[in-house]
Amino acid sequence: MASSPAVPNLTFRQLRGQRSPGEFAALVRRAAREIGEQVACDARYIGRVEAGEIRCPNYAYERVFLHMFPGSTLADLGFSARETVRGRVARDRTPPPPDTYNSTDSTYSNEESDVLRRAFMTSGTVTVAAASLGLGGSLPGVDALRQGLRADVPRQRIGDSEVSAVEEAVRRIRLLDDRHGAEGLYRRATQPLRTAYALLDAGATTRGSTAGRLAASAGELSLSVGWLAHDSGRLEDARSHYAEALATARVAGDPALEAHAFCNTSFLARDAGRHREAVRAAQAGQRAAGTLSSARLLALLNLREAGGWAGIGDRSGCEQALARAHTLFGRGPSDADPEWMSFFGEAELQALEAQCWSALGDWARAARHAQRATALKDPHFARNLALYRAQLAADLAHAGAPAEAAAAGEKVLDALGDVQSSRIRVMLAETARVLAPRRGTAGVAGFLDRHAETARAAALSR
């Protein structure tokens, strides 16, 4: 059935006034931060709304718009009713609570957001959620182009729809990773990555701006897939993906992508025990990010550097990098902050500092920072919350607080049904090892037995 032509949203256009689409998008992002939402609104999204392509915003954007224009309804802003957009009466449905789904995607229509939301709400496993997003196959919107990439078939032009498909895959992977962790996603995500680089290698874009977007999105996808490998313990695979992204950044002359690649490379080097490499990569990332006007990005890169110094055992170098990170973080967020940094707030700052003190053997201080991280974390980032609690459990165990460590470990075990991360399992195993001699302490035996059972079940499922 043919779809109805888009009807321009003139009401929304009037609300924008004399501001440019980019300036208005910045106001939307700022309003989102005021209420704890995370949207990646840009000029293109505003253009799609005004052109009538987005007839009804997703729930995250709805909350932001109603915050910007108090007392208004969606109809007052020129949008259609949600049930009309879906083509059916929304029976017995209510919007999910704010922490159920928090979109960072500026391209999703309301219908697509609803598919994502239902996947998270109704699927108990990452496999079902990943399949619902198309990560088991190729990128949405790219299938028709595959024949054009063959050597024996004339190549087709690559335009905005194909580039948007790559950008969409990056956001979908990040959303799933935030909820479920990396394991179970990595293998599915490699196919979209191969397709993205096939598009890049085809070199058949119509405009320089499209080529730049494609290179940036392919590099970001490589980093996202590399992170999935990293978080699931495939460190050599992660190293390869990060190197591919760095090469893409260098060829494209993209300092934002380069800074992101060095940030991930530094993190990986620290986890692999190559601490001096972690320091050098973090410093290289800071040089790349120097012209990007994002204090938060520089703060994160200084935290990566601090982690490297801590791994070497250089307490002075670590403290200096931590001090710079806190100063930069204190300058607050800005519109120049990269979209991928949505996870980086006060909780992540505290968790990364906790890791530094752990590496330096200051367990009590590490536990204090890890405790702050668990208290601050947005439950939308379920994997990170479980990671912070695993960090807390390990720090408490080393600090000589076995009962408290066991209680924190129990909370992590509660999350493992939906969150899959080898890093979390390694940290829990370390906590169990340290607590084993304290089995007689209240709560410790129960944690140890449950951990052992969970570890056996995980081993059998591989």
Image (tube, rainbow, N blue to C red):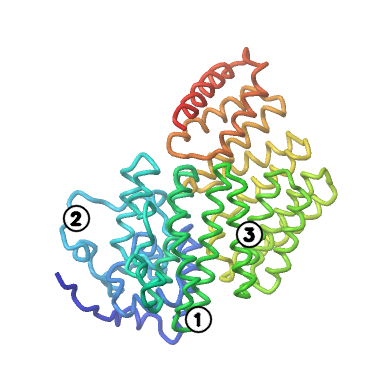
Real-space Cα distance between discs 3 and 1?
24 Å
Identify the image quadrant of the N terminus: bottom left
Looking at the rendered structure, the secondary structure element under dot 3 is: helix
Q: Between tags 2 and 1, which lies in front? A: 1
Place of residue 390 in the rendered image (x, y in percent of width and height, measured from the top left): 59, 35
Against 378, is 15 above or below?
below
Place of residue 118 in the rendered image (x, y in percent of width and height, measured from the top left): 30, 50
Report the residue at 47% width, 60% height from top: 194
The local crowd at label 2, few if under 14, some if 14 to 19, many if 20 or more residues have their Cα within 10 Å, is few
Relative placement, left or right, of 408 versus 5 is right
Report the residue at 33% width, 79% height from top: 50
Q: Nearer the viewer, residue 269 or 28?
A: 269
> Disc 3 residue type?
Ala
Q: In the drawing, what numbered circle is on residue 243?
A: 3
The local crowd at label 3, few if under 14, some if 14 to 19, many if 20 or more residues have their Cα within 10 Å, is many
Q: In the drawing, what numbered circle is on residue 90?
A: 2
> Disc 2 residue type?
Ala
Q: Which residue is mark 1?
A: 209
User: Residue 121 occupies which quadrant of the picture?
Assistant: top left
